[in-house]
Amino acid sequence: MMPGFNTDSLAITAQLVRLVLFLVPIGLLAAASLRQTGATSMMLGMGTAFEAVICFLYFIRIHFRRQPFGPALIAVYLTALAWIWWGAQQDDWFTNLAKATLLIVPLLAFAYQTLVDSGAPALRRARMLAGRLAGRRDWPADWAAIRSLPEVKALRAAMGSDPTPALILLDHARSEVRLAALAALEFRKDWRPGQAALVLQLAQRAEQPEIRAAAVMALANVEDRGLVETVAQFLHDASWEVRKAAIESLLWDTEKRWSWIRFAVRRILADPLFEADGPLVRDGQILAVEAVKDLTAWCAEKGALASRAAATLAAHYNRALTERVDDNLVKTLRRQLGDPHTPAVLRLEMGRILESHQELDYDLLEKLLDPAEPAPLRLIAAEAMLTDHAETPGRTVAIAALRDLARLPNREIALSTASVIQRRLGLDLGLGMGQPLPSIHSRQAAEITRRVMLWAAQYDLPEDVEDSRATPARIAD
């Protein structure tokens, strides 16, 4: 690019060139009509007006709808050529020049359009950009910054049907160059036979986690089942960055791929080494129906599989409810939450999701406050009851449930109960505002537990909560 030019100036220049090219046939027709006489001149004048209208409509269509320029230009010039060919009676040098111009320009436009459609200019540009990346010496230290380099984005856009320029860089000695090439191939759809396998081989032999992750992301759009199942093995990679890339690469299309990867997903969810990874879909990708069914069934298992499957379902449902509140989905989640046969770990996640979206109705909350329900669910219901039904008898039932929970010999439950009491009842139990709960083995946790149990055992209550000592059964009577 020449000094002093930028993208905007080049775009304006291109628009002016297009406008001039559209005006040329109008000018030739107008000049030809002036050189003729009588009916011939009038006919060419009508052709000039007709051509002006056609050129205007074509130019507006190209400008606002981003239509291809070449076909419109060819049509305009050939139309003008037909007017002069059949309308001009005087065969002089100007008429021949006009005919030649109106014939040569569309031929050149057709040749240029054919060249562009062949992909040769884009491939040449891609090779130039790949050469620049190969010769670059100043690289960002961060992998994300390499992905955002203008040269990488330009290379990704320049590679049409042939990713060869980027594939050549995969054997480069510098890891930064290989990373840039893989970033340009990210989520690529068009692969020629054997090309995706080259990227997979690089992922399998690379020592750097960044390169393995980038290679996995490059294969996110492959449709070969064998390749997809091989990529699924990276769900067990030692690097969290690679596992995250594999999740993003595989789970964006569970509608088609779930049957190919379900066993690999089950293994990773059940592996206690990766239990700290939490939900499989951290960003809350929408999962296919079959995936939801399998994850729901896995919640009935034991250990890490159940907890991570439930957390993954929670992320899925949270995304679904955030995008659009579906009454049928809300009813399904409420039914699962209220059913005692639903695995406890899944009921807990459903309770948190419905509570965060304020979709817990009074009847369900009252049911969850029953002493037979798990303590974490009773705690969620008590807080929701105090939030949404502060002026109803449910407040008394909720406080009674909190007193029952405070008496349990479980420090973790006691700390969670103290948090609810302090937030909803305004009683200072020693928790820091906006701070996470202290470790259950800390001295602060022991003091908070003592205060909660003391609160549960006291009888001198404020007047507005003096009936909170009653059990839910007595209130129901």
Image (spheres, rainbow, N blue to C red):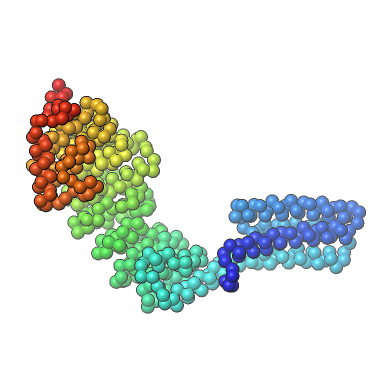
Within the image, what quadrant is residue 317 found in? top left
Q: Residue at (31%, 55%) from the top-left corner?
A: 261
Nearer the observer, 34 or 218: 34
Q: Residue at (88%, 60%) from the top-left corner?
A: 35
- Please indicate, yes or no, whether residue 189 appears anywhere in the rendered image: yes
- Against 111, is 459 above or below? above
Within the image, what quadrant is residue 74 found in? bottom right
- Please indicate, yes or no, whether residue 89 appears anywhere in the rendered image: no
- Against 118, is 265 above or below? above
Nearer the observer, 24 or 95: 24
- How far from the left and from the top, in percent, is residue 344? 19, 41
- Against 309, is 427 above or below? above
Q: Residue at (41%, 63%) from the top-left corner?
A: 186
- How far from the left and from the top, in percent, is residue 23? 74, 59
- How far from the left and from the top, in percent, is residue 408? 10, 39
- How far from the left and from the top, in percent, is residue 128? 51, 74
Q: Which image quarter holds the N terminus?
A: bottom right
Whether residue 11 sits left or right of residue 274 in the image: it is right
